[in-house]
Amino acid sequence: MRDDRSTEARLPLLNEPAPPFRARTTKGEKSLDDYRGRWLVFFAHPADFTPVCASEFIAFSKAYDAFQALDCDLLGLSVDSLFSHIAWVSSIHDRFGVEVPFPIVEDPSMAIARAYGMLHPGADSSATVRASLVIDPNGLIRAITWYPMNVGRNVEELLRLVSALQLSEREQVFTPAGWTPGDAVLATPPLTAPDPKAWSPSGEQPDWYYRLEAANA
């Protein structure tokens, strides 16, 4: 039998506007519009008081200043209630000595999770929610990562991802595999191949479509 609920939601696409929302958080009521003009990593976790999620929130909290240095805010979300979030943040502080400096959105109705495609329309639990979205200052989704319940995210990779997105946009360049800040970047390839007689391969530029160059600071 066909399930009409399958048309109620879809996965968000890169470079489209992030779905708007307003909700209660551990830092007061927040709206997606509150983050316009800055980059944002909006990440969801399956549930409070779970081991993998706790390890992630500790890692995000320790990297908070590094994200801020990139003009990038952090915003967490789960389907748990605000009171559960507050109790969990207190537990992380008491048991691990880590203060969670960013807001955590409550989503007990799972409306936000579904709007972002984090849950199948017919899902009756939050078991599949472990998603991260990088949203740019204009409110556009620039990157999405998905992880299962039992595998924690790499916060350093998200920092690298934000840095790469910012540099690529600012300098109109590409970043190669494994790129980290300070590494060489790839020049935007031309739309047509150059005249072979005018092209001279080198170590940094082995062919017309692959040209490494120093990144501007």
Image (spheres, helix red, strand yellow):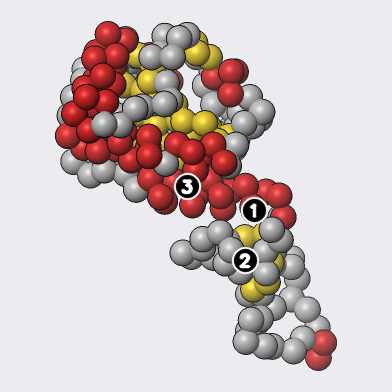
Where's residue 135, x and y in %?
A: 55, 34
Q: Name the residue that disc number 3 marks.
A: 159
The disc label shown at residue 198, or none: none
Query: Residue 37's image quarter?
Result: top right
Assess whether mark 2 and mark 1 are in contact (beta carbons under 8 angstroms). yes
State the quadrant of the C terminus: bottom right
The kind of secondary structure element at disc 1 is: helix
Amino acid type indicated by mark 2: Val
Q: Quadrant of residue 110?
A: top left
Secondary structure beneath disc 2?
Answer: strand
First of labels 1, 2 by sequence position: 1
User: Alpha carbon of mark 2 to alpha carbon of mark 3: how far?
Assistant: 17 Å
CB under 8 Å between discs 2 and 3: no
Residue bearing mark 2:
185
**Which residue bears the numbered disc 1?**
168
The mark closer to the camera, 3 or 1, is 3
